[in-house]
Amino acid sequence: MPWWLLGSGAVVAMLIGASWAFLSNRPAHDAVGGMPLATQAQVTGSMDECRRVVENMPALLRHNRAESFSPDQVLQNADLLRDYDRACFRPYAELSPVGQTVIGVMAGALFVKSPADGSELFRCSAFRLSPSVVATARHCLLFGGDAGVFEPAAFTFRLFGAPDMAFPVQGHVPAQHLLPADTSAPAAPGDHWMLRVDTRAVAMPDAAALVVQAPDPGERLSIVVIGPNLFLPLLPGGEGTTWTEWIRYDDRPDCNTVVEGPGCLPHRCNTLQGMSGAPIIGKRGDRPNSPYLIVGLHLRSAEASDPACGRDPEGNLGVVLPPALRAQFQPTGHPDRPGNSTQEGEKP
């Protein structure tokens, strides 16, 4: 929901010193002020419309739990929920072809088996670091607050670009058990986890198209957020839709962040429930052949105080991708690691 009240992660695409529209099909400009006047007015109007919609939302909608809504409440607020989706987000299908090519085979979602009937339930966002390792937020493995931890076998990973392929989660990386006591209210820089998943059936992005790199401290970044709108299937007419139809992104120019220590990556974009654990990716420069960068991992709302990153009631919180995760990165054509093989000791 609104960026100042909602959290959970998202696929976050960051532009580093480049166009804020590098993933979309919108005209590419360094800033709103550098756009042609007609385009500038269009973009500014879109930003204002999103703000108006958010300001008109009742307090009930300013929470991050779709499951807390009763069917009657969803029906009562259906128009507002549709207005928010229309004014503040764009469908995944509107990403540029290049953006879909890179993100589609790198980013996706974790589903967990329903204890009632074994069906798949959307749990969190996640992304591939290699053909055998998937990263997500550590708190996504918890259920019932800190009452327990999902076993790896409960999860299935699916890619945005290959949604019909289900990849079972086989274990943790490194191999260890995750206990509730280890995960209760983790500080943001520690709220990450790696899972062992064999995704070799889909090639990783090429090393020339995607790299891992930590951003510079204090560097101001414009961002784009991509993830599911879990309210859409609850709205009238949404019963027959699939999860890929719920994927949205926010590419307004006022989506931005400043890299902060220690390892904190706050940002201000509209987000939705279920986006925890997605990559923060970016691009230096607007040349067609410049690679995308994985710079961080999106977590949650920063409204609540964090032991390491403090409190920002008007923002969301991500974490700079830690060295342990960066070390696992294995694109296709990596000079040290062939893209469709696995590292020694990391066999799926």
Image (cartoon, rainbow, N blue to C red):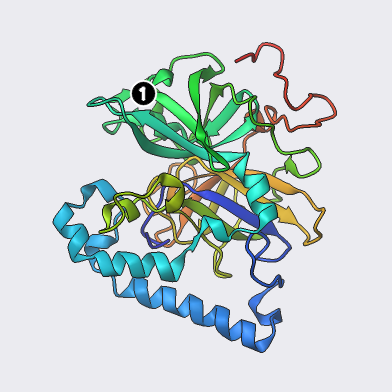
Secondary structure beneath label 1: loop
Task: Name the residue type under label 1.
Answer: Phe
- Is residue 112 found left or right of 161 in the rendered image? left
Q: Residue at x 63, y 55 (%)?
A: 14
Q: Residue 295, position in %: x, y?
A: 65, 45
Categorize mark 1 by other alpha carbons within 10 Å: few (<14), some (14-19), many (20+).
Answer: some
Query: Residue extending furthest top?
Result: 345
Which of the pair 301/309 is nearer the observer? 301
- Above or below — where is 175 with respect to 310? above
Q: Residue furthest bottom?
A: 37
Q: Position of residue 240 (x, y in %)?
A: 32, 49
Rendering quarter of residue 183: top left
Label 1: which residue? 150
Any part of residue 263 in sight: no
Towards the viewer: 317 or 248: 248
336, above or below 65, in the image: above
Q: Is residue 121 above or below residue 239?
A: above
Residue 26: x percent and y percent? 64, 70
x 69%, y 81%: residue:
35
Q: Nearer the viewer, residue 224 or 266?
A: 224
Q: Nearer the viewer, residue 273 or 205?
A: 205
Left or right: 22 as drawn, with respect to 181: right
At which x and y percent is residue 8? 42, 47
Residue furthest right in the image: 335
Seen at 40% across and 62% down, the residue is 4
Q: Quadrant of the N terminus?
A: bottom left
On screen, residue 69 versus residue 49, left or right, reads left
